[in-house]
Amino acid sequence: MYRRIILKLSGETLAPERFSPTDASLSFDAARVDRAASAIVKLAELGVQVGVVMGGGNIWRGRFTDEMNPVLADQMGMLATIINALAVQDAIVRLGHGATVFTAQEMTRFAELYRADRAIERMEAGDIVLLAGGSGNPFFTTDTAAALRAAELRADAVFKGTTVDGVYDSDPRTNPDAKLIRDITYRETIERGLKVMDITAFQLCREQHIPVIRIFNMDDLDNILRVARGEAIGTVVHA
């Protein structure tokens, strides 16, 4: 069993599977937000300290014109992750569990400014910690933010959910003969340029001695619990 996990949760996990003009939100589906929160709470109830790095893809997908300033576009993405963190915090609290949102940007009327020691303190007190705002810098993905927070918070593992079953030797969405790789080292992942997770994130985990990244399909959110219990799901990436 892992002691402390950083879970990378995509914004798409919270979004409607399909849109309707009568939807209250085009970015959120209440039932899907509640399911994500429930899976996170169940993970914490296993006795695991949980930090969740939020994505923002349900709200913001990047520049909508080539002329748009890329720094401003990335800052908008950071704000999207904060909105998502607040939505998940609300759902977790409604389930009766404590949750604290930390942001990489100062906005203390909404959340706490991120500090590693304070985040560890809250996790050790039993709160689920929602880590928003990415790394706080443009040009870095939330995958890299997850690796950075794992290093800072001395996590045992990074859990990365995807829409496929793990790391493949090529893109399974375009190559029907792509083969799932069950076990692979950081070095080999980087050398082969396998892109299920940002290469910078793999490199950071390797350099900072993060024991393992577990990459698995998160269409079924119960997979989070299966992986935490040690089931052989998805791909194990390690030193």
Image: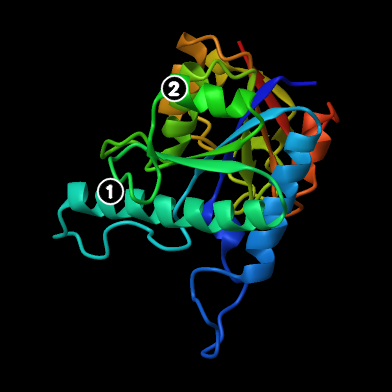
Residue 106: give x, y in percent of width and height.
28, 40
Task: Report if residue 238 is visible in the image.
Answer: yes
Residue at screen point 53% across, 22% down: 120
The dot on residue 224 is: none
What is the x, y in percent for residue 136? 30, 36
Residue 165's place in the image compared with 204, above or below, is below
Please count the marks in the image. 2
Residue closer to the observer: 27 or 120: 120
Task: Please identify the quadrant where the N terminus is shown.
Answer: top right
Residue under the point 32% across and 56% down: 62
In the rendered view, tell whether residue 194 sits above or below residue 60.
Answer: above
Quarter of image, res 16: bottom right
Is 181 left, or right, of 130 in this rendering? Answer: right
Where residue 167 appears, as percent x and y from the top left, is 64, 35
Q: Considering only vertical position in the picture, is 11 above or below 235?
A: below
Residue tagged 2: 116
Q: Amino acid at mark 1?
A: Asp
Q: Nearer the viewer, mark 2 or mark 1?
A: 2
Dot 2 falls on a residue whose secondary structure is helix
Task: Give the image location of residue 219, x and y in percent.
Answer: 71, 54
- The residue singled out by tag 1 in the image is 74
Instruction: Name the one closer to the observer, 99 or 137.
Output: 99
* Label 1 environment density (alpha carbons within 10 Å; few <14, some 14–19, many ≥20): many
Label 2 crowd (10 A; few <14 / some 14-19 / many >=20): some
* Left or right of 143, for residue 105: left
Can residue 191 be seen from the camera position used here?
no
For the residue marked with disc 2, what is the amino acid?
Ala
